């Protein structure tokens, strides 16, 4: 079974600084999707960024970028120029592309605090 | 696009009672997913529908849980004979296809007294 591990329960960053959140996963599949979702307190989960495993180029979305290391099964999220609104729980998630299953497998999350 | 809508936002009930939650997906999405999130954990998959067909169920979905999507639009998740361990946030998501991302609603928080 696929598993996703986020080893940092909590992280903090100063406003305008850069922070990196870690994620590792375990799978025997060769093709899959990886995601980072953001869940602000008492608000809905929002997709931050998505990576397809067959694409070697790391995905970027404005201030958010990933470092995808397929051989190491590592998928970290870098947030540049951190803003107060970035404070939230961040979840790393995995999904197969083949075999019919469309379920997302989530890690336990990292709580990000942004200090002014 | 009004997003995924879930009702109620909060449900408090006594142990042993039945509860039902509703999810209205984004209108053009044919896929609908249910997840459960307990405190300090990431969401865990429960089940998903493509149109009205329930295509996958987790082992977490015991026989006390049932989900339906009768007309391929909104879905309901019912829990019978609730137990303390059912206390959680129940999240619904919808998606437009097998390779499209899932969009989540605000969730229904269930508290069992």
Image (tube, grey):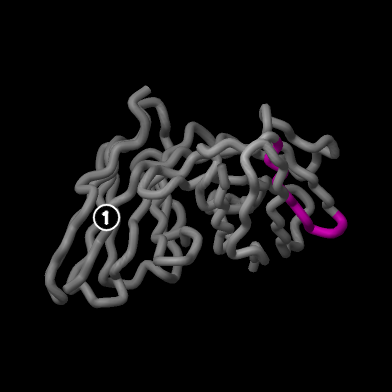
In the structure shown, which secondary structural element does the residue marked by tag 1 occupy?
strand
Tell me residue B24's x, y (percent).
29, 37
Tell me residue B84's x, y (percent).
25, 77
Residue visible at 29% across and 55% down? B67
Left or right of A71, for residue A5? left
Q: Which span is picked out in magenta? A: A71-80
Predominant SS along the magenta part: strand
Q: Residues within 10 Å of mark 1 (few under 14, many from 20)?
A: some
Residue visible at 29% across and 68% down? B87
* Residue A106 in view: no
Q: Nearer the viewer, residue A83 or A78?
A: A83
The residue that mark 1 highlights is: B77
Q: Nearer the viewer, residue B111 or B92?
A: B111
Left or right of A116, for residue A45? left
Tell me residue A1's x, y (percent).
64, 68
Would you place residue A12 above or below residue A87 in this image? below
Quarter of the image where the C terminus of chain A is located? top right
Would you place residue A111 above or below residue A97 in this image? below
Quarter assignment of residue A60:
top right
Residue visible at 37% across and 42% down? B105
Left or right of B94, for residue B8? left
């Amino acid at each position: 079974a696929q598993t996703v591990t986020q080893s940092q329960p909590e992280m903090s960053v100063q406003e305008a600084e850069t922070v990196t959140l870690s994620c590792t996963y375990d799978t025997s599949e060769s093709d899959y999707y990886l995601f980072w979702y953001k869940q602000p307190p008492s608000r809905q989960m929002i997709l931050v960024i998505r990576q397809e495993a067959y694409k070697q180029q790391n995905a970027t979305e404005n201030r958010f970028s990933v470092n995808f290391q397929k051989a190491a099964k590592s998928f970290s999220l870098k947030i540049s120029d951190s803003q107060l609104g970035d404070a939230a729980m961040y979840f790393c998630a995995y999904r197969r592309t083949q075999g019919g299953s469309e379920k997302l497998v989530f890690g336990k999350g990292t709580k990000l605090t942004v200090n002014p | 696009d009004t997003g995924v809508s879930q009702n109620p936002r909060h449900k408090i009930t006594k142990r042993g009672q039945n509860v039902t939650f509703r999810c209205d997906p984004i209108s053009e999405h044919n896929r609908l997913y249910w997840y459960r999130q307990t405190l300090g954990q990431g969401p865990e998959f429960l089940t998903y529908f493509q149109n009205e067909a329930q295509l996958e169920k987790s082992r977490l979905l015991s026989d006390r849980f049932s989900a339906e999507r009768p007309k391929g639009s909104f879905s309901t998740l019912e829990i019978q004979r609730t137990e303390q361990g059912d206390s959680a946030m129940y999240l619904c998501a919808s998606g437009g296809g097998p390779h499209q991302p899932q969009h989540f609603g605000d969730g229904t928080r269930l508290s069992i007294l």
